[in-house]
Structures are given as structure tokens and as C-alpha cells.
Image (spheres, rainbow, N blue to C red):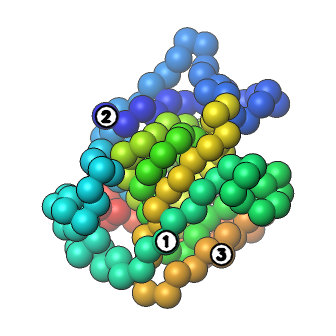
Amino acid sequence: MVRAWFIKDSNDDQRLEHHRDPPQYVEEDYLREHGILYWKIDVGNLSENETLEKIKKERRYNYEDEITVSREELPDFEEKIKGFFKEHLHVDEEIRLCMEGSGYFDFRDRNDCWMRIAFEKGDLLILPAGVHHRFTLDTKNYMKAKRYFSGEPVWTAHYRMEGKLHPKFEEYVHKRDNGLLL
């Protein structure tokens, strides 16, 4: 089961859980209302995982790679982590399967409140195109994930700017508010 909650504004270490007081957990249905999809996948034998193969086929994922986010494996680690945690969106959906380690995906809900989703081994998350989000490791400072793409892989982040909304965000909001994301 996915673990997700609203987070408090804080200047403390981004790798901490940042629960509100009292904690405010979020059900998976609330994530789905925002177009965020979740599955638990057995990563022991991916080539025979029927759920993963079905998702890849339905969503036309034809390219995959793997990224390891750690000081030892990722060049320019500190700069990359800062970039991952800067609020951004993508024009395509973002699909990640955690193979090892852990971290957090944060996104803004319809009320512009930050929510945090724990991302651990076996978690498959799909963030819809146009949703503002960010990523950080947790205090273990290690995560290995598969990334899936439909068509040519694109890693371009479009950073949120005050007073200017990306057209893909406006499209996302329209779909979200009209129940068209699933």
C-alpha cells in the first residue's frame, strides 16, 4: 500500500518526512483524483511480472533505463539532487519503479498544498504530464529506479515560475478538475 501525507512547510532537511502535527495521511483514491497511479511490483523477476507487462503495453512504454541516485553513482550528485527537488513538471508522464533504496515524490494538490509520497522498493508510480512535483532521497541517500518512456525518452524539466503557467499544467488542471486523468 502506498504511503502518502500532507507535509508542512519547513526549511529542515528535505530528506525528512515533514509530517504535519498531527499527521495527515492521504488515501490512494485522493492520489488517483490527481492522476497519480500506484502499483506494488515484485522486482525480483520483472520479465515475468504480468502487472508490469500489462502497464507497459497499455501505456505504450517502449523504452526503459535505470538510474542510481547516490553520491557514489551519480555525477554531480549535490547539484542533481538540488535540481530534482526544484519544483517542476514534464510534458510527458513520469514513470518510476523503485528497484532498491528509497526516497520521496512530492506534488501539489488542487489546493496547492504539498503532499509527499514514500517511494520504496517495489513501488511503481506514474505522475501525469503537467503535474508540479519534485523528488528527493530520504536519509539513506540511495535509490535505484527504472524509468519508462513512450517514444523518445525526454528528461526535460520545466520549472515553475511565479505568474506564468506552463500550457501542460493548464491542460493537467483541466483534466484533473473534470475527472479525465484516468
Dot 2 falls on a residue whose secondary structure is loop
Corner quadrant of residue 59: bottom left
Dot 3 falls on a residue whose secondary structure is loop
Q: Is 139 rendered above or below residue 94?
A: above
Q: Earlier in the sequence, mark 1 or mark 2?
A: 2
Please provide percent x and percent y for residue 91.
Answer: 55, 75
| Residue under the point 33% across and 51% down | 43
| Residue under the point 30% across and 41% down | 29
Q: Which residue is mark 1?
A: 65
Q: Nearer the viewer, residue 18 or 149?
A: 149
Counting every numbered tag in the picture gives: 3
| Residue under the point 65% across and 75% down | 156
Q: Which residue is mark 3?
A: 156
- Quadrant (top left/top right/bottom left/bottom right) for the N terminus: top left
Q: Nearer the viewer, residue 74 or 111?
A: 74
Q: Nearer the viewer, residue 164 or 108?
A: 108
Amino acid type, label 1:
Asp
Q: Is 140 rendered above or below residue 89?
A: above
Please provide percent x and percent y for residue 37.
Answer: 35, 53
Q: CA distance from mark 1 to mark 2?
A: 25 Å
Dot 1 falls on a residue whose secondary structure is strand
Contact between marks 3 and 2 (CB within 8 A): the answer is: no
- Of all residues, the one furthest to the top in this rendering is 22
Corner quadrant of residue 170: bottom right
Contact between marks 1 and 2 (CB within 8 A): the answer is: no
Q: Earlier in the sequence, mark 3 or mark 2?
A: 2
Q: Earlier in the sequence, mark 1 or mark 3?
A: 1
Amino acid type, label 2:
Met
Q: CA distance from mark 1 to mark 3?
A: 16 Å
Q: Which residue is mark 2?
A: 1
Amino acid type, label 3:
Thr
